[in-house]
């Protein structure tokens, strides 16, 4: 168990462990025996190892859901929902600014300076950034584009959506927590029966 | 062939004619291949555009290109275009995946192989060694072509796969290209299926050379292509699933964002209160694995003592923080308002100094006494000095603050400030 010490500490601290944030630990977590060992260890702490649908991130869940745990989960859910819209807007902004037609994915490299430059040249991106940076989740007070972008990335790092490999360099890596967010969106869509399609309609595809 | 079945004595003459034909073909081929290099620029323009530009081509050069079937003219009025085979050749040379074509037509090659084998065996039975050699050469070439065609197609498929279909940028295009590549594989596999080794075994009979060429060698190659194609196929399917997943994620996020924009007051249910809490929502609170130095293990004591010695000494004795605490806490409401009023009054004093610009300056206490302000002298002086010190350096230079001060007593060098006089710096 001793070799899992640092990993356990990270998990207990509420971190999401993915292939980007800790490749070594992530590979170990893919082994069923290791997962069982960790689960046994976590039992007295009323916690267990959990993962998302595609198994790309690991985090800790409550083993037994008592009232206290439910209260905490309700509060946490509220916070996540509060951040949902600004996070979705951020995902869309990144997609547009990078000129991709797919969302940013774990392992993608993001450079705020480059992104700022692209927003500067494009009024619509500029406005999108302004809107989301000013949201209380990102909480930028500045009207400077660079400062807004910086604040947005600071908050994303605090929430574990990106990580900064070198403290003195403004280069970020997208983590697996983005997958978790997308899965959560899918969960809300399914639970609430929201009229949101994610598959390309077959008929339309045939036309292409 | 059978119509000009040669008699034994006519054979040398015919061999000679065949040699001559071969020679003519070679010289014309060299001449025409050279045309490709000579007009490379115009041809490349024809490759990337719709038509071959004729501006720099003479009538003679154009006719040569037409005769060599390097270019062709679809109709009399229209422009000159690159021949399809030349376009294919260039695409192949450049590994240009946007234009590279996969030729899966095996049926015709098999037809050719059959007739070559038959004519080879005829030549053999009649002892025409030169013709026999020629047929064997063409047979080898036909097989090499077939093999090369599959190798090229597989190479092209891998290139596309490894670049994630990088030659198109939009996800929809990638999905379509992937789909097209998968259909090509199906055609290629269908083509391989046409090769019937039982038929070939019968065709070659007991000829060892043919058997080696058409059975063992071809069989090895076919099975290699088969494996490669299956591998590419499964990788393409995987990649397609990834493309579709990316597309679905992107659509999901933009759909949800649009929905939330339309329904700003939308609140989903509280999944944490359900009897079955979805796994995704169940995220335990952070737990800090804290630890403190403990001395109950004899062996640890030495380590901790060493650590203690290694700690840097504090530079200054720490102050008792509690004594300074309350002042900051009480800076609320009324107190803050009084402070602001004092600050405003001091600012008015500074403005008065600027307005009067008296050479001697204005004494702060005189100003206080002349006005109807009720501030204590000490607090007033304190704020006037504080205001001066808090000015930006550039503005500070515009004023001179003179303190009238004295020693506290003969034996105490403490300076007591009785009054300050403020004047503008430029009048000095």
Image: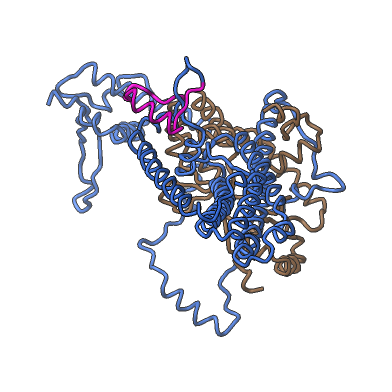
Write the residue at 20% across / 53% down: B411
Seen as rendered, the residue at the extreme top is: B77
Q: Quadrant of residue A201?
A: top right
> Which residue is painted at 59% across and 60% down in the image?
B124
Q: Tell me what residue is drawn at x 85 percent, y 44 percent.
A: B274
The reply to whether the magenta stretch includes residue B59 is yes
* Image x and y of residue A117, in percent: 42, 33
Magenta highlight on residue A52:
no
- Please give left or right for residue B385 compared with residue B304 in the image: left
Give whichever of B418, A7 is nearer the camera: A7
Left or right: where B226 falls relative to A112: right
- Considering only vertical position in the picture, is B157 above or below A39? above
User: Which chain appears blue?
Assistant: B
Residue, x 22% and y 24% (percent of image)?
A: B362
Chain given the colour brown: A
Image quadrant in which you'd find residue B248: top right
Give the answer, above or below, for where A4 lies relative to B19.
below
Does residue A180 appear anywhere in the picture?
no
Vertically, is B37 above or below B131?
above
- Using the image as rendered, state which of residue B313 and residue B327 is in the foreground: B313
Q: Tell me where residue B197 appears, x and y as whole percent.
A: 71, 58
In the current view of this chain or complex, which residue is farthest to the front? B9
Compare residues B293 and B34 and report the one nearer the observer: B34
Between residue B261 and residue B146, name the one nearer to us: B146
Find the magenta span and give its range: B50-74
Q: Is residue B58 left or right of residue B127?
A: left
Instruction: Please state, as top left, top right, bottom left or bottom right, where the C terminus of chain B lies in the image.
Output: top left
Q: Position of residue B154 (x, y in %)?
A: 58, 50
Left or right of B315? Residue A43 is right
């Amino acid at each position: 168990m001793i070799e899992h010490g640092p990993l356990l500490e990270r998990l207990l601290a509420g971190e999401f462990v993915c292939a980007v944030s800790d490749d070594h630990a992530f590979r170990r977590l893919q082994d069923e025996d290791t997962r069982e060992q960790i689960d046994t260890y976590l039992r007295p702490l009323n916690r267990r190892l959990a993962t998302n649908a595609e198994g790309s991130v690991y985090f800790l869940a409550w083993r037994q859901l008592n009232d206290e745990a439910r209260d905490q989960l309700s509060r946490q859910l509220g916070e996540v929902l509060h951040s949902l819209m600004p996070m979705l807007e951020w995902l869309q902004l990144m997609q547009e600014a990078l000129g991709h037609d797919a969302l940013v994915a774990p392992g993608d490299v993001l450079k705020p300076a480059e992104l700022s430059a692209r927003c500067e040249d494009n009024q619509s991106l500029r406005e999108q950034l302004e809107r989301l940076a000013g949201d209380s989740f990102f909480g930028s007070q500045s009207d400077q584009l660079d400062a807004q972008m910086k604040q947005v990335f600071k908050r994303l790092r605090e929430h574990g959506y990106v990580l900064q490999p070198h403290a003195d360099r403004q280069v970020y890596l997208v983590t697996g927590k983005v997958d978790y967010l997308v899965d959560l969106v899918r969960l809300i869509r399914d639970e609430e029966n929201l009229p949101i399609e994610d598959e390309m309609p077959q008929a339309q595809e045939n036309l292409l | 062939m059978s119509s000009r079945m040669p008699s034994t004595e006519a054979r040398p003459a015919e061999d000679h004619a065949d040699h001559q034909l071969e020679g003519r073909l070679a010289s014309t081929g060299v001449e025409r291949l050279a045309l490709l290099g000579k007009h490379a620029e115009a041809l490349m323009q024809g490759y990337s555009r719709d038509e071959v530009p004729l501006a720099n081509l003479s009538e003679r050069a154009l006719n040569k290109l037409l005769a060599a079937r390097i270019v062709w003219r679809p109709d009399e009025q229209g422009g000159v275009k690159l021949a399809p085979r030349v376009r294919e050749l260039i695409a192949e040379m450049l590994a240009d995946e946007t234009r590279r074509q996969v030729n899966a037509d095996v049926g015709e090659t098999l037809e050719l192989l059959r007739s070559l084998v038959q004519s080879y065996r005829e030549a053999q039975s009649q002892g025409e060694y030169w013709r026999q050699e020629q047929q064997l050469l063409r047979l080898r070439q036909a097989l090499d072509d077939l093999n090369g065609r599959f190798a090229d197609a597989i190479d092209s498929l891998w290139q596309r796969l490894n670049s994630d279909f990088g030659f198109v940028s939009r996800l929809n295009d990638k999905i379509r290209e992937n789909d097209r590549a998968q259909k090509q594989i199906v055609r290629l596999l269908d083509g391989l299926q046409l090769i019937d080794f039982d038929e070939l075994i019968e065709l070659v009979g007991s000829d060892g050379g043919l058997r080696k060429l058409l059975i063992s060698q071809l069989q090895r190659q076919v099975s290699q292509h088969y494996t490669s194609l299956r591998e590419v196929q499964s990788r393409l399917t995987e990649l397609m699933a990834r493309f579709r997943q990316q597309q679905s994620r992107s659509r999901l996020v933009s759909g949800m964002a649009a929905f939330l924009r339309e329904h700003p007051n939308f609140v989903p249910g509280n999944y944490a209160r359900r009897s079955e809490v979805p796994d995704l929502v169940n995220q335990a609170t952070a737990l800090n694995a804290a630890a403190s130095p403990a001395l109950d293990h004899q062996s640890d004591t030495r380590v901790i003592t060493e650590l203690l010695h290694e700690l840097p000494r504090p530079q200054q004795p720490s102050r008792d923080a509690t004594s300074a605490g309350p002042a900051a806490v009480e800076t609320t409401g009324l107190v803050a308002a009084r402070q602001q009023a004092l600050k405003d009054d001091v600012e008015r004093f500074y403005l008065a100094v600027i307005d009067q610009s008296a050479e001697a300056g204005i004494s702060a206490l005189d100003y206080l006494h002349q006005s109807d302000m009720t501030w204590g002298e000490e607090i007033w002086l304190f704020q006037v000095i504080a205001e001066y010190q808090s000015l930006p350096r550039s503005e500070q230079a515009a004023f001179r603050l003179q303190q009238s001060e004295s020693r506290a007593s003969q034996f105490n060098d403490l300076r007591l400030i009785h009054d300050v006089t403020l004047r503008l710096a430029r009048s000095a």
